[in-house]
Amino acid sequence: MSIENILIFGAGMMGKNIAFVFSSKADYRIVVYDIQHIDVHAGIRVNAAPLISKGILDVDKLERRLSRISFTTDIEGEGIKNADLVIEAVFEDMALKQKTFEDLEKHCSRDAVFCTNSSVMSPSEISSKLKHRDRFAGVHFWNPAHLIPLVEVIKSDATSDKTADTLMEVLAGVGKKPVLCKKDIPGFIANRMQHALWREAVYIVEQGIADAKTVDEAVKYSFGLRLPQLGPMENIDMVGLDLTYNIHHYIFKHLCSSTEPSPLLKKLLDNGKNGFKTGEGFQKWTDERQRQSAAVLNEYLVTMLTRK
Ligand SMILES: NC(=O)c1ccc[n+]([C@@H]2O[C@H](COP(=O)([O-])OP(=O)(O)OC[C@H]3O[C@@H](n4cnc5c(N)ncnc54)[C@H](O)[C@@H]3O)[C@@H](O)[C@H]2O)c1
């Protein structure tokens, strides 16, 4: 499958950054579609500003990359017709996503590869009404998509190996770290692990074992430090399967195994405590603390991912 023309369908937070990712390769022409007019170049400029201020990207290079990205609201236009690869990033709504691909199947070529960037929705279900389901897959970019390397490529119950291989190759070619999720399963690979950890973190707070800040510190100052270099599977091999077996045998029965969200989470929400959005969640968040939290994270990600 030869990919030259890329259509990003939906120009919100994810769509803009995904377009920027593909613009790193001079061979690609990227068209961004949205139902409403959106200044995609302006959005990308804002998101790229920290890279420029750190000297990771220069202004000329940014402008060259932007020249490969155009925007349209014309569903009948050339950008849709010529697309070899479509990445959908519209609202997280099953009916909207299904309808989007049914429409795209009418407008795009038979060979175009279709992908959804849905964080949680099943690619098998999203593509269920399509005629050519073999060339459809999930590609789950993480936010911020232009910085986080991982992209999960999720095979639906009908995705062909050829489609999955093409996506792995294309994503690696624009500097991403694609991983293949061989089964269409809720949470794919990384979010399953992330939320297993969050369930236990909330449980520890709920049970009065430690407060929220302490839980975060326990992660940040211990296994959180090694995680970027040492994943759980390598770690198991490193310490020994015997030790791991004995620990799991002893501890698993004590860990939270609830299949419902925590009652404490529900209680806080019911009391209007919705985190940054309302200034308080598990902890209090003034505007200044929120700004600081976002700035520290952004600085850390840029520094770590670009080694500058
Ligand atoms: N935000 C995240 O952290 C994140 C991370 C990974 C994946 N995702 C997934 O990416 C997708 C988009 O998320 P987002 O955060 O960019 O959303 P967003 O709300 O920022 O953007 C959605 C865009 O879709 C457009 N849109 C809506 N209906 C449309 C239609 N019929 N045709 C064309 N465009 C339409 C909207 O105008 C808007 O610009 C969702 O499926 C989401 O689950 C989000």
Image (cartoon, helix red, strand yellow):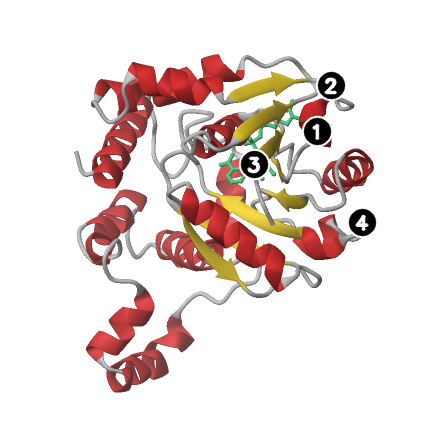
Image marks 2 and 1: residues in contact by CB distance under 8 Å: yes
Mark 3 CB lies closer than 8 A to ligand 1:
no
The residue lying toward the viewer, choosing from 66 and 253, is 66
The residue lying toward the viewer, choosing from 289 and 67, is 67
Q: Quadrant of residue 81?
A: top right
As measured in the structure, the alpha-carbon distance from the residue carrying label 3 to the one carrying label 1 is 13 Å
- Amino acid residing under circle 3: Glu
SS of the residue at dot 4? Answer: loop
Q: Which residue is mark 4?
A: 130
Q: Which residue is mark 3?
A: 4
As measured in the structure, the alpha-carbon distance from the residue carrying label 1 to the one carrying label 4 is 17 Å
As measured in the structure, the alpha-carbon distance from the residue carrying label 4 to the one carrying label 3 is 23 Å
The residue lying toward the viewer, choosing from 307 and 261, is 307
SS of the residue at dot 3? Answer: loop
Quadrant holding ligand 1? top right
Q: Which of the image's four quarters has the C terminus?
A: top left
- Amino acid residing under circle 2: Asp
Q: Which residue is mark 1?
A: 80
Q: Is residue 204 left or right of residue 30?
A: left
